[in-house]
């Protein structure tokens, strides 16, 4: 695993890169709003992608590198993500397919930027469909804007809601809540099966 910092319009981001020799695609994942790239669901997703022969990059947004927990607005977060993905594509020779994603907040960033990154698919771990207790404040438009295959893995008792499946968007509900820690085996099997179809 190579760990390095790369410049973005919002300051340095930190990348944890496991490059595969075969260059069989690239999975780029972002963390939750106040979370870390070592979260259990991100770790499992990274492991199954590596087992499938993909390169994997776990990205720490600049605000987390700077020690802050609360994310800045999309106008600062999204350009930073775009810069990291572009750097990774150049570094690795633009491996395909390119799958972007993340957990919760990171999934939202990946959805909003899917077209601009040139993603071939998007992986959403615990997509926060709405704030807890506020279903009227839906964020489904971010998912619905993605025009490539999407996998959403959601805990059945997630207080952040349950996104709906549609067209290219597959939604798989597993045991547990927003952390997805209750069924890591189920999470791994779901992601592995989906990646096999994408690859």
Image (cartoon, rainbow, N blue to C red):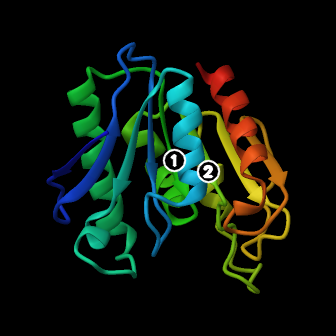
Q: Residue at x 85, y 59 (%)?
A: 175
Q: Nearer the viewer, residue 11 or 111?
A: 11
Q: Residue at x 69, y 41 (%)?
A: 188
Relative side of 166 to 63, left or right: right
Relative side of 153 to 103, left or right: right
Q: Residues within 10 Å of mark 1 (few under 14, many from 20)?
A: many
Q: Residue at x 70, y 49 (%)?
A: 152
Q: Quadrant of residue 79?
A: bottom left
Q: Name the quadrant of the N terminus.
A: top left
Are the residues tagged 1 and 2 within 8 Å (C-beta)?
yes
Report how far apart the C-alphas of labels 1 and 2 lie in the structure.
6 Å
- The residue wearing badge 2 is 124
Q: Residues within 10 Å of mark 2 (few under 14, many from 20)?
A: many
Which badge, 1 or 2, comes first in the chain's sequence? 1
Residue 25 location (% of width, % of height): 45, 23
Q: Nearer the viewer, residue 49 or 138?
A: 49
- Identify whether 181 is placed above or below 132: above
> Element type at marker 1?
strand
Residue 100 location (% of width, % of height): 48, 41
- Identify whether 45 is placed above or below 139: above
Residue 15 location (% of width, % of height): 28, 49
Mark carried by residue 196: none
- The residue wearing badge 1 is 101
Residue 163 location (% of width, % of height): 77, 59
């Amino acid at each position: 695993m190579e760990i390095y910092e790369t410049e973005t319009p919002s300051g340095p981001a930190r990348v944890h890169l496991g490059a595969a020799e075969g260059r069989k695609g690239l999975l780029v994942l972002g963390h939750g709003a106040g979370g870390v790239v070592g979260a259990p669901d991100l770790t499992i997703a990274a492991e199954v992608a590596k087992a499938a022969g993909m390169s994997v990059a776990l990205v720490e947004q600049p605000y987390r590198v700077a020690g802050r927990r609360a994310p800045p607005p999309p106008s600062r977060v999204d350009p930073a993500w775009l810069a990291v993905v572009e750097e990774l594509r150049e570094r690795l020779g633009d491996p395909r397919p390119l799958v972007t994603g993340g957990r919760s907040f990171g999934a939202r960033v990946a959805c909003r930027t899917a077209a601009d990154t040139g993603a071939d698919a998007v992986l959403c771990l615990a997509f926060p469909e709405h704030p807890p207790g506020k279903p009227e404040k839906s964020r489904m438009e971010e998912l619905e804007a993605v025009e490539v295959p999407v996998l959403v893995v959601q805990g059945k008792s997630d207080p952040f809601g349950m996104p709906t499946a549609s067209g290219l968007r597959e939604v798989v509900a597993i045991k547990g809540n927003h952390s997805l820690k209750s069924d890591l085996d189920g999470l791994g099997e779901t992601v592995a099966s989906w990646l096999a179809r994408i690859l």
